[in-house]
Amino acid sequence: MANVNGMGTVFNLPNFAGQLYSSSPVVTPFLNLIRGKAVKTDNFQFAVGVEYAHETATQPAISETASVTAPTAISYVRSQSTNVTQIFHEKVSVTYAKMSNSGRLSGINTAGAQNDAPNELDFQTARAIEKMARDVEYTFINGTYQLAGSSAQANKTRGMLEAAGTVIDCNNAVLTQDFLNSAYKAAYDAGADFTDMVLICNSAVKQYLSIIYGSQAGFNLPDSRNVGGVNLTTIETDFGALRIMLNRFIPSNVLLGADLSCIRPVEEDVPGKGNFFREQLAKVGAAEEYQIFGQMGLDHGPGWKHFKIINIA
């Protein structure tokens, strides 16, 4: 049944007996992994890092005579990278009549059946919060950067796929170990540390990884002779270990390598209210109406700490 854009009433929000399930993914593994490192800001534009670079390393050739005179100074120029917080905003609206009719059931009415969502306002609030969490998860991975120039323009936070500085293009070829090794090497050469790196992928790429590494000699021998299959959770590379995260919000033709050591959410509180709060809206009739409001962005650190493989067949 299609969701209702607008106020919930007795007739557009029927009650049913039975176990509640969501047919949409509500798991947010990336947000869950980094939410404990959240920091606060009071400016919607915030720094994700200040960088400088050294000259190419060389062997000095300085004679005794030359050393009498000090060399020309090298002044190191710094540059700043920024991101923004953006608004996440939902409304909950339920009529008094709908709230009063929690015992009116649609569908199969077996004796003793009960409405599994007896408090419609609480149910709709919980679903709105789930939606916001899903939107944050999607944005932190897929978000494209936009800095608002006026109150009529939206700030949009940059996600990990746009932030990743090292890119390997499969050009619609099947993912192979050569592509993976090229990505690991390119990321390391660009400066990635591999100290707390996680590979984020969808189901198709996860199966590719299990096939690629599961075929290695000795890997596919189970502890028990009545167990089969491969579930790859960690990859050991020449540059460090990579954990694997399944995520339904990343495109199926992309593999993302994200260094968690420099990633954190950035929250922007409303004074006296906090962040992601529910507050009642002004009464205009026989209904309960609330808004849920939050502001959050992603501090992804320097782009060279992350990599991605794109256009996987």
Image: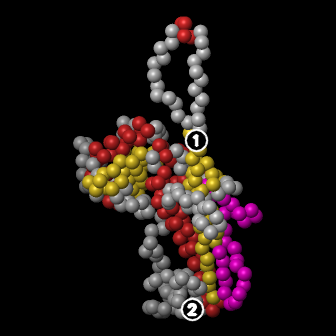
Residue 146 vs residue 284, the one in the foreground: 146
Q: Residue at x 33, y 50 (%)?
A: 169
Give the image location of residue 180, x and y in percent.
33, 46
Give the image location of residue 133, x and y in percent.
54, 65
Q: Which residue is mark 2?
A: 10
Q: Which mark is residue 88?
A: none
Compared with residue 236, is residue 23 higher up or lower down, i.e. above or below?
below
Q: Amino acid at mark 1?
A: Ser
Q: Secondary structure at mark 1?
A: strand
Task: Please state if 43 lies on the left or on the right of 31 as rendered.
Answer: right
- Crowding at dot 2, Cα within 10 Å, few <14 / some 14-19 / many 20+, comes out as some
Q: Which residue is mark 1?
A: 79
Q: Is residue 138 magenta?
A: no
**Picture quadrant of residue 84:** bottom right
Q: CA distance from mark 2 to mark 1?
A: 58 Å
Q: Amino acid at mark 2?
A: Val
Quarter that holds the C terminus: bottom left
Q: Residue at x 60, y 12 (%)?
A: 69
Q: Is residue 280 magenta?
A: yes
- Crowding at dot 1, Cα within 10 Å, few <14 / some 14-19 / many 20+, comes out as few
Give the image location of residue 140, x and y in percent.
51, 58
Residue 50 appears in the picture as rendered:
yes
Quarter that holds the N terminus: bottom left
Compared with residue 284, is residue 72 higher up or lower down, i.e. above or below?
above
Compared with residue 19, is residue 99 higher up or lower down, i.e. above or below?
below
